[in-house]
Image: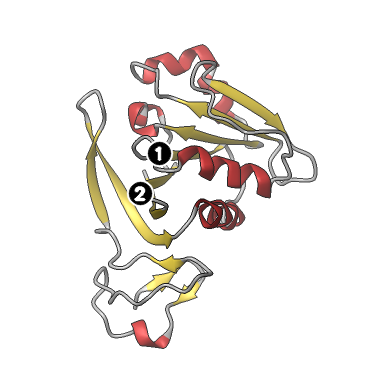
Amino acid sequence: MVQSPTGLLPHHYRGSPAGHLPRVPAPASPPALLSPLPPPLTVQRAPQGRAFCILVEWGMHVESVEQLKEEAGNFLQKLTIGEKATVVGLIGELGAGKTSFVQGVAEALGITESVTSPTFVLEKIYQLVDAPFGQLIHIDAYRLDGEHELKQLDWDTLIGNPKNLIVIEWADRVMRALPEGTRIVTLTHSKESRDISYGSK
């Protein structure tokens, strides 16, 4: 039985082979399950040429940036605090919606200041109030040449703090440094619509 993030799929999906759900017209809202789902295990290649595997769990299709941000807020509600930091890696080409996804997470956490991609400063930290996490750490790895450059951000300390929610754009550039269990969000886009695949390292 194929499951959605919130439970069993509606009756008209049942009986379809896993990973090959029929496409149905998506309503204006809420976002629709991505159909067909991506293959359960995908192999991608980092910019440095190293391959890595992602276990894909489910997918969504959204029609606008507004829906993308709303879906990011829904995704946030599924995260739980563990013994170490919660790490989310975002993968996608320029314009795929990585920063918009972070903005949706930030809005859901009650952050009111403008959230932009820290391309040149590498990292921005937002202190949180009345939220399950103590701070949101937004990292942009686009300009990094490899995992070793995360050391300048005191990476081991960051991922050791269970109150940290770390969201990394261009996560495929530093994949080997991401801890096991990192949530991986892959975004692809066509004009205003986006397909979102959720998985884990």
Determine the residue located farthest toward the right in the rendered image: 130
**Residue under numbered circle 2:** 189
Residue at the image position 31 percent from the left and 46 percent from the top: 54
Amino acid on which the number 2 mark rests in the picture: His
Quadrant location of residue 179? Answer: top left
Up the image or down, 6 lies above or below 129; here it is: below
* The N terminus lies in quadrant: bottom left
Q: Secondary structure at mark 2?
A: strand
Name the residue: 42% across, 52% down: 192
Left or right, 2 with respect to 103, comes to: left
* Quarter location, residue 159: top right
Residue 44 spot, x, y in % from top left: 23, 40
Q: Determine whether, in the image, residue 187 is placed left or right of residue 168.
A: left
Task: Give residue 170's position: percent from left, percent from top.
Answer: 39, 31
Task: Work out which quarter of the rendered image holds the C terminus and state it.
Answer: top left
Q: Residue 70 shows which numbered tag?
A: none
Res. 82 visible in picture: no
Badge 1 is on which residue? 95
